[in-house]
Image (tube, rainbow, N blue to C red):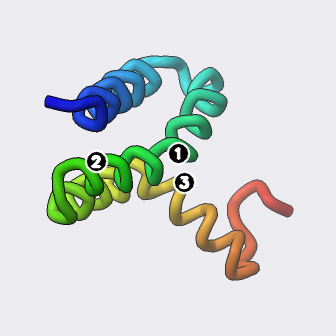
Amino acid sequence: MNWAFWGAVLWVFAATATAFLPMRRQYAPGIVLLILAPVMIVWLGMAHGWIWSVIGLLAFISMFRNPLRHLLARARGVPTEGSQ
C-alpha cells in the first residue's frame, strides 16, 4: 500500500463525514472534495494502473452526480434551479 491508496482512503472517509453534515454545512467541504477528486483519481491511476482510475472516476461520478449535472448545465448556459 502506498501514499496514493491511503490518500484515496482518506478522501473517501472525508466524503463520508461530509455527507453526515447538515446540508447547509456540506458546501465548503464538498467543494474542496470536488476539486481534489480529479487529483486523487489521476494519482491513484499513476500509482496502480488505469483501471483503478476508471473505477475511481465511476465512483466519483456516482457520488457527485447532482453537482456535476448542475455545473454542466451552467457551462452549457441552460438555466438551473435558483440561478435566476
Q: Residue at x 45, y 53 (%)?
A: 38
Looking at the rendered structure, the kind of residue marked 1 is: Leu
Residue 7 vs residue 84: left or right? left
Picture quarter with the N terminus: top left
Identify the secondary structure beneath mark 3. Answer: helix
Which residue has dot 1 on it? Answer: 34
Above or below, 11 against 25 in this view is below
Looking at the rendered structure, the kind of residue marked 2 is: Leu
Identify the secondary structure beneath mark 2. Answer: helix
Q: Earlier in the sequence, mark 1 or mark 3?
A: 1
Q: Residue at x 28, y 48 (%)?
A: 44
Identify the secondary structure beneath mark 1. Answer: helix
What label sits on residue 67 in the rendered view?
Answer: 3
Looking at the rendered structure, the kind of residue marked 3 is: Pro
Check whether the beta carbons of the residues at disc 3 and disc 2 lie within 8 A of each other: no
Q: Closer to the camera, 39 or 80? A: 39
